[in-house]
Image: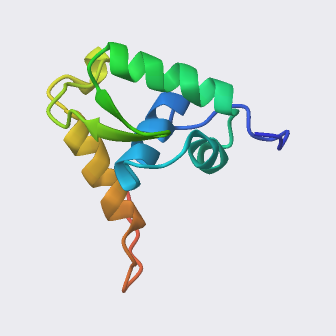
């Protein structure tokens, strides 16, 4: 993130990596890093965190890795109690789907 006005974001790098792997379970570190706008080293550390805590499993196929997400694993923060990885992935997938009509929501 090189833009000076971006001091915070809604998703962590861990969430971005997880969602990128959900979209392409055989993605290379380089492409995950590019998609998440972080370094390959950061991706490697994040994948290790996610694997250690049981959010994904890595299977080596020659020089490539194939990732499998544990979609039923609960999200870590108490504010997301009751939500699982599947909920985050589905939310992201629905946000990625093409929109046919625009809508606005007002919250009071």
- Percent coordinates x, y for residue 5 in the rendering: 80, 41
Q: Quadrant of residue 71?
A: top left
Q: Residue at x 19, y 32 (%)?
A: 83
- Percent coordinates x, y for residue 89 in the rendering: 30, 47
Quarter holding the N terminus is top right
Total label count?
0
Q: How is the image coloured?
A: rainbow
Whether residue 106 is situated above or below residue 89 in the rendered picture: below
Question: Can the viewer see residue 108?
Answer: no
Whether residue 102 is situated above or below residue 28 in the rendered picture: below
Most distant residue in the front direction: 62
Q: Residue at x 63, y 41 (%)?
A: 33
Q: Residue at x 36, y 86 (%)?
A: 100
99 or 16: which is nearer to us? 16
- Answer left or right for 68 relative to 29: left
Most distant residue in the bottom direction: 100
61 or 68: which is nearer to us? 61
Whether residue 58 is situated above or below residue 1 in the rendered picture: above
Whether residue 33 is situated above or below residue 102 in the rendered picture: above
- Percent coordinates x, y for residue 43 in the rendering: 57, 30
Q: Quadrant of residue 52?
A: top left
- Percent coordinates x, y for residue 75 in the rendering: 27, 25
- Answer left or right for 103 relative to 80: right
Question: Can the viewer see residue 92?
Answer: yes
């Amino acid at each position: 993130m090189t833009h000076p006005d971006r001091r915070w974001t809604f998703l962590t790098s861990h969430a971005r990596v997880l969602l990128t792997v959900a979209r392409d379970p055989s993605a290379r570190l380089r492409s995950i890093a590019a998609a998440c706008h972080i370094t390959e080293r950061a991706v490697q550390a994040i994948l290790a965190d996610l694997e250690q805590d049981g959010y994904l499993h890595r299977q080596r196929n020659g020089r490539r890795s194939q990732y499998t997400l544990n979609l039923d694993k609960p999200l870590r923060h108490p504010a997301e109690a009751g939500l699982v990885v599947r909920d985050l992935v589905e939310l992201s997938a629905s946000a990625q789907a093409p929109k046919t009509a625009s809508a606005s929501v007002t919250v009071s």
